[in-house]
Amino acid sequence: MWDVNSGTSVADLTGHEDVVTNVSVHPTDWLIATASKDHTFRLWDFRQPGIHEVSVFQGHEDSVTSAVFADGTRVLSSSDDRTIKVRTQPSGKVAAVFGIGMICCPVVLSYIVTYRMLPRRC
């Protein structure tokens, strides 16, 4: 993580085993979500001094392309396996899975666009 004002690194988030594909900031809480090609997304809590990994979420069968906060209680993750999973916070239980051929893309805070993909992968 970088301090925008000073241009200096303030923390390293370590834990993903492959490239990070997306970072999202919770709209009201001091949490961030990171998605990765390692098929996981992680929640990080920086309400306390230092940054702590809160949870590692598994279950996608391919790279996780985004993990976004839908509201204060849900996180949506989309994957190259072409599914969207909705998980509740803080339990992390899967509340819904939107089936094959779906992806979600964060546009601006609190606004998420979902797309149905064509049968052929790009």
Image (cartoon, grey):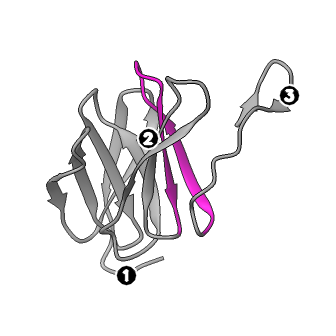
Against 56, is 46 above or below?
above
Q: Amino acid at mark 1?
A: Arg
Tell me residue 51's x, y (percent).
58, 35
Q: Nearer the viewer, mark 1 or mark 3?
A: 3
How many neighbours does mark 3 have within 10 angstroms: few (below 14), some (14-19), or many (20 or more)?
A: few
Residue 19 is one of the magenta-drawn residues? yes
Q: Nearer the viewer, mark 2 or mark 3?
A: 3
> Which mark is drawn over residue 120?
1
Per the rendered image, the range of residues in magenta is 18-37
Tell me residue 48's x, y (percent).
52, 24
Pointer 2 with pointer 1, Cβ within 8 A: no
Q: Secondary structure at mark 1?
A: loop
Q: Nearer the viewer, mark 2 or mark 1?
A: 2
Residue carrying label 3: 7
Residue carrying label 2: 106
Q: Is residue 70 left or right of residue 5?
A: left
Q: Amino acid at mark 2?
A: Pro
Q: Secondary structure at mark 2?
A: strand
Quarter occupied by residue 20: bottom right
User: Is the stretch drawn in magenta largely helix, strand or loop?
Assistant: strand
**Which of the two residues, 12 or 116, is positioned nearer the viewer here?**
12
Q: Residue at x 62, y 31 (%)?
A: 50
For marks 2 and 1 on the same chain, the one whose residue lies earlier in the sequence: 2
